[in-house]
Image: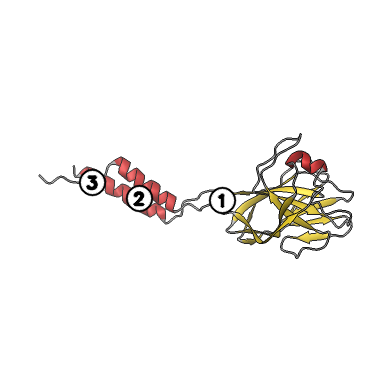
Amino acid sequence: MHKKHIPTLATISFAASLLFTAGIAQASSLSIAGATPISFFGFNGQPSTFTGGYSSGFLGTLVANEPIRISFTYLGSESDYNNSFAFLGNALTEFNAPGDTTASVLVGAGTVSFSFSDDQGGSVTNGDAEKPALGFAILNGNLTPISGPDFGPFDYVLGFNDSSTGDADYDDFVVGVKFVPISPVPLPASLPLMAAALGLFTFARSRV
């Protein structure tokens, strides 16, 4: 006798899950464009309490490979200047407490828009050419706190070096960078396919 191949509920559920999975937006990542390795010394003070010591990193431009949500966390400062950080309408200053975090903002693919500045008129924007004694380094995001809480891990840590010519240690204003995957949203096109799959199951059951 010819045996009918009737789709089971488990089969239909599996097919439906594949349809949902196919429509889910995948998380993107951050990368460093034009990465140039650097070494430095003297990273200390308040930032090192929360991050541990750094002596190497990269110069370059922080780039989002696809649209993502991104936030920044203040990790302290070590400078005679009053420094600050700005990101798409969000700001972190030395009046913030370490651990304070900006809103998570959706950014498009490309150069992430943020800047550091000091109260002497010095400023640097992500994507700017590095200037003598003024810029930021992109550091490892895994923290090794000395005595403070561990606010990480982060995807990267950014260390600002303000316009003071006394040193180049990238601890004058420090922030952690974390990207957040965009919430999965099924594409509308998958819904009719699911309806068709469930309809097939109903039709098959009616013919048993």
Numbered disc 3: secondary structure: helix
The x and y percentages for residue 31 are: 62, 57
Mark 1 sits on what residue? 182
Please state, as top left, top right, bottom left or bottom right, where the N terminus lies in the image.
top left
Residue placed furthest toward the left: 1
Give neighbour class at mark 3: few <14, some 14-19, many 20+ (Cα, 10 Å).
some
Q: Which numbered disc flags the more N-terminal residue, 1 or 2?
A: 1
Please state, as top left, top right, bottom left or bottom right, where the C terminus lies in the image.
top left
The x and y percentages for residue 29 are: 59, 54
Give neighbour class at mark 1: few <14, some 14-19, many 20+ (Cα, 10 Å).
some
Amino acid type, mark 1: Ile
Mark 3 sits on what residue? 204
Mark 2 sits on what residue? 195
Residue 91 shown left or right of residue 166 in the figure: left
- Taking depth in this image into account, of 70 and 190 the one nearest to the observer is 70
- Taking depth in this image into account, of 56 and 126 the one nearest to the observer is 56
- Quote the CA–CA distance across marks 1 and 2: 26 Å
Numbered disc 1: secondary structure: loop
Identity of the residue drawn at 32% across and 50% down: 197
